[in-house]
Amino acid sequence: MQNILYAPWRTEYVSNKIIEGCVFCHISTHAQDDAALHVLYRNEHCFMVMNKYPYTPGHFMIIPHKHTDKLEELDPEVWLHMSALAQKGVRLLKEGMKSHGVNIGMNLGSAGGAGIAEHIHMHLVPRWERDTNFITSIAHNRVYSTDFEKIYQRIKELVDIYI
């Protein structure tokens, strides 16, 4: 017997327009749509965007504008800039969102677990003590405890302070 978790609030999310090609390149080249695409910050090297499939509230990514699947070929200046943003992003999550910790990670290539393997991206995932429960560890589902749009707006406000 298969259990079904009813989540009517996701209807709008899963029925949105499908982006053709690389979703990260689309976000990179559509600055006029930053609010709709949940972009938190952008500059000439990279951008920060909320993760549409968050592990926890506040999960965002840092992504270079350059389309590449090879971290080893990324311009060192871009990598240093991404790293500096990661440091600021950790402070934002710890101080601004009151997270107890942060996971930072990159899954390189489909064999490395990347959901979008063709364009490298760095995840920043805020963590709180006891934020894993039976629904995650036994039922293999995640519970998102707050509204995605509210979290986006809050982090967008914090970007002005911390980034």
Image (tube, helix red, strand yellow):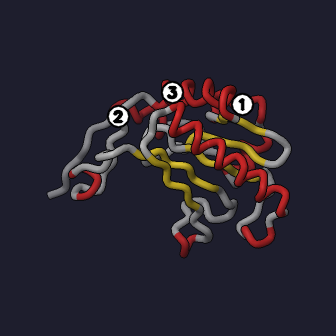
In this picture, is 67 found above or below 102? below
Which structural element holds mark 1?
helix
Q: CA distance from mark 2 to mark 1?
A: 26 Å
Q: Which residue is mark 1?
A: 33
Amino acid type, mark 2:
Ser
Please identify the quarter of the rendering in which residue 67 is found: bottom right
The Cα–Cα distance between marks 3 and 1, rounded to whole angstroms, is 15 Å
Q: Viewer-nearest of labels 3 and 1?
A: 3
Looking at the picture, does residue 14 appear above or below residue 33? Answer: below
Residue underneath mark 3: 149
Q: Is residue 11 left or right of residue 118?
A: left
Question: Residue 74: x, y in percent?
Answer: 80, 65
Give the number of the disc on residue 145.
2
Query: Is 6 on the left-hand or right-hand side of 97?
Result: left
- The x, y position of residue 158, in whole percent, is 61, 28
> Could you tell me which residue is drawn at 54 percent across and 60 percent down?
115
Q: Is the residue marked by circle 3 packed among few (<14), some (14-19), or many (20+) residues within 10 Å? A: few
